[in-house]
Amino acid sequence: MGEQENELFGNLFGTINLLSEEHLDAILMSMNKDLALYYLVESVKAAHKRSAFTIGESEVISKAIRTLSKKEETAE
């Protein structure tokens, strides 16, 4: 296997590896409500790791994520 096969195009939020620009396009084109919620949660977690929020803001965001996740689980 060549080195180029192992190279990533990029990474989203520190958790989602992108293989190519086409992979990013596929993510964007296939997005639905469940995936949108997942990406939003991952983006908020990444921002939190980068110290983008105060402790109070983090607490509110954490509760909001738990609330949204709970509603999504019970809606199914």
Image: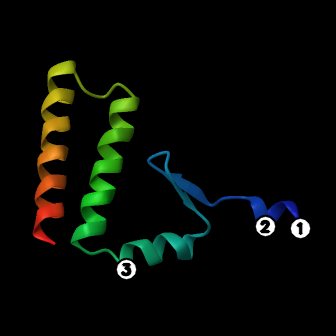
Task: Determine whether the residue tagged by mark 3 lies in a helix, strand or loop.
Answer: helix
- Label 3 amino acid? Met
Q: Position of residue 51 (x, y in %)?
A: 35, 25
Q: Nearer the viewer, mark 1 or mark 3?
A: 1
Quadrant including the N terminus: bottom right
Q: Which residue is mark 3?
A: 29
Vertical relation: 27 (above or below) 9: below
Density class for disc 1 (Cα within 10 Å; few <14, some 14-19, many ≥20) is few
Left or right, residue 24 beside residue 59:
right
| Residue 1 disc label | 1
Which label's residue is closer to the chain start, 1 or 3?
1
Which residue is depicted at the point 62% across and 61% down? 9
Question: How is the rendered protein coloured?
Answer: rainbow
Query: In this view, which residue lies farthest toward the top?
Result: 55
Which residue is depicted at the point 38% across and 73% down? 28
- Label 2 amino acid? Glu
- Label 1 amino acid? Met
Task: Determine whether the residue tagged by mark 1 lies in a helix, strand or loop.
Answer: loop
Q: Which residue is mark 2?
A: 5
Query: In this view, which residue lies farthest toward the right?
Result: 1
Task: Determine whether the residue tagged by mark 2 lies in a helix, strand or loop.
Answer: helix
Density class for disc 2 (Cα within 10 Å; few <14, some 14-19, many ≥20) is few
Quadrant position of residue 5:
bottom right
Give 12 or 45, whichever is nearer the viewer.
45
Quadrant position of residue 8:
bottom right
Which residue is depicted at the point 55% across and 76% down? 22
